[in-house]
Amino acid sequence: MRHARRRVVRRVTQLAAVGGLLLGGTMVTSAVASEPPDPSVGVPYSAKPGTGMGTDLVSRLGTSRTAGSWVDSSGRPVVAVTDEKAAAEVKRAGAQAKMVAHSMSDLKSATSTLRSAPRVSGTSWSLDYQSNQVVVRGDSTVSSSDWSRMTEVADGIGGFVRMERTEGTFTTRINGAEPILSTAGRCSAGFNVTDGTTDYILTAGHCGPDGSVWFSDDRGRDQVGTSLKGSFPGDDYSLVKYDSGRAGKGAEVVAVGEGEGVRITGVADAEVGEKIFRSGSTSGLREGEVTALNATVNYPEGTVTGLIETNVCAEPGDSGGPMFADGIALGVTSGGSGDCAAGGTTFFQPVTKALTELGVKLIVAKQAGGAAPAPSASGAASPGSSAPVTGEDVSGLLTRITDPRNVGPGLLVIAGSLLALVATRWIRSEQDRKAYRQYYSATWG
């Protein structure tokens, strides 16, 4: 009976160990298989512009009953409304309503009046949804007389126009993130896009006129492509056509410094209050928040409208670089004031409008089984580059397998199961030796 029980215990232990090996192997396989898939290189993929609940409510209720929306610190959508009925509808939808005195129609009418006034270089205005005001800013280059004249225009509109002086100057941030260089200057690649036949770099329009030839080195040996379809002023976007016609592997990745990159999985419109990141070669990866939309900036070179206003810093050398949030493309750097020591305001050209006007689609990470790829990845990649994110060679595979964050639990299960099998074998051998000795000891002299 005792031997039968031992056999049962051994058999159960062996079965458990084998089951552990199978489970651990499945865990490792799943971890490796769950690695972000290859990008849709050269394949047009366009995510539908994302609209949050607040944006949908504003669109449904109309500009006379609302005055924009934003995301509060807890991530909850807030909608500015002008009547109780609209407020009730917002609350029923699950968002927060804030009663305001001026509708979106009022705010836009104010900006139209400002735009019709004589142009003053070094000024900007934007719609501050949270304060229900139009904010007019003047940099250090605006003279006292020009500022007084603009203040008179603002006073004529009403008390919801706020006048502010700002340090620094509103300039286009020419030079660049991961650099592309031409006789027009030094700029930055933003995102890779395609028309289904040819791939391009989406960058800022002020970087150079159509026909500008771009290089990736300062000696003009490594030609990247040629500018075309630019729009500046008015807008601030352009395309750089790859000489090879293809962006190559890693086309869905933008650089964030130190050999790291972020996988871009879609495109959307920015929301006020949204946390964002911007990448550039001068100041690296920086984070901030969207503070206003539909901003107008009067650069020395001309006026640009429809920009995204943020409090993220930028410096000369960051122009054209990508702005994104959670792997979603939002904008390319246009210009601003200040620097990353004192802070300042930075404006971005919305990606959604640029894609629509240019007739191209964003190249993003391939969707696998309906699940979005991981938002970040390692590797030497630059905005608009064709560098691979990670190689699919043996060393890359081994790196993933030995990464405890990905497959550590599975490897632990396998190791424990192997130890259990070895221990079971050793115990069985010891028991057999003892049984042998007990059986034959009676015949030993």
Image (cartoon, rainbow, N blue to C red):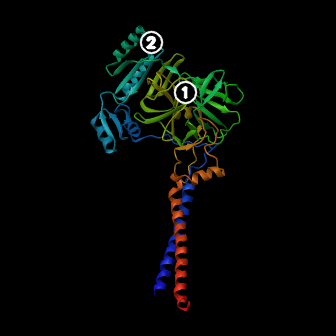
Amino acid type, callout 2: Val
What residue is shown with label 1? 282
Of labels 1 and 2, the one closer to you: 1
The answer to whether residue 208 shows anywhere in this view is: no
Which residue is painted at 59% across and 32% down in the image? 202
Residue 148 rendering spot, x and y as whole percentages: 38, 10
Which residue is painted at 40% across and 20% down in the image? 136
Label at residue 142: 2
Amino acid type, callout 1: Thr
| Marks 1 and 2, the one that precedes in the sequence | 2
Question: Nearest the camera: 298 or 284?
Answer: 284
The number of numbered discs placed on residues in the rendered structure image is 2
Decide if residue 26 is on the left or right side of residue 310: right
Q: Is residue 360 above or below residue 421?
A: above
Residue 329 rendering spot, x and y as whole percentages: 52, 37
Question: Nearest the camera: 53 or 34?
Answer: 34
Residue 377 rendering spot, x and y as whole percentages: 55, 44
Query: Marks 1 and 2, how far apart in space?
Result: 27 Å
Label at residue 119: none
Most distant residue in the bottom direction: 443
Q: Secondary structure at mark 1?
A: loop
